[in-house]
Image (spheres, rainbow, N blue to C red):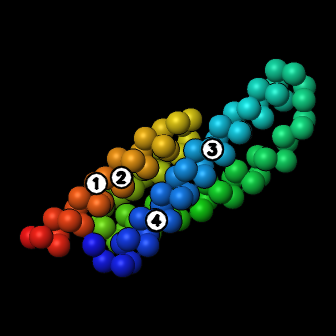
Amino acid sequence: MSAQVRAALRRFKVMAVVVGIGLLILCLELVLHYGFGNESLAWWSPIHGMLYMLYLVSTVDLGFKVRWPMRKIVGVMLAGVVPFFSFVMERKVAREVESRGADILTG
């Protein structure tokens, strides 16, 4: 696996975990806001939006480097909007890219 792909994968993995945790905090913020009228986490929404944008950029970066079709890139991007799914996709994508890298090195 090239150093560029390895770096892109590392960025993607970090952003997938950060966005997954951020989405869980956002869900908590929504429950507090709409369920209890508590505004204590209202500041989190715009921060999560910026983190999600970074996740999108890291997904496109990785997708272009490993030559995914656009449909797959969009599918991985959408994983960041479903609670817990970004964690699942992070593992799946990491395994796939790492195994492709091993195949390239040995093949």
Q: Residue at x 69, y 52 (%)?
A: 49
* Residue 68 x/y as whole percent: 30, 61
Query: Of the residues shown, which amino acid type is indicated by label 1?
Result: Glu
Q: CA distance from mark 2 to mark 4?
A: 11 Å
Q: Residue at x 84, y 48 (%)?
A: 43
Image-based side of 24 in relation to 46, left or right: left
Q: CA distance from mark 3 to mark 4?
A: 17 Å
Q: CB of mark 2 within 8 Å of CB of mark 4?
A: no
* Residue 90 x/y as whole percent: 43, 49
Q: CB of mark 1 within 8 Å of CB of mark 3?
A: no
Residue 53: quadrant of the picture: bottom right
Residue carrying label 3: 21
Q: Quadrant of the C terminus?
A: bottom left
Residue carrying label 4: 10
Query: Of the residues shown, which amino acid type is indicated by label 4?
Result: Arg
Observer-nearest of 9 and 75: 9
Query: Of the residues shown, which amino acid type is indicated by label 3?
Result: Ile
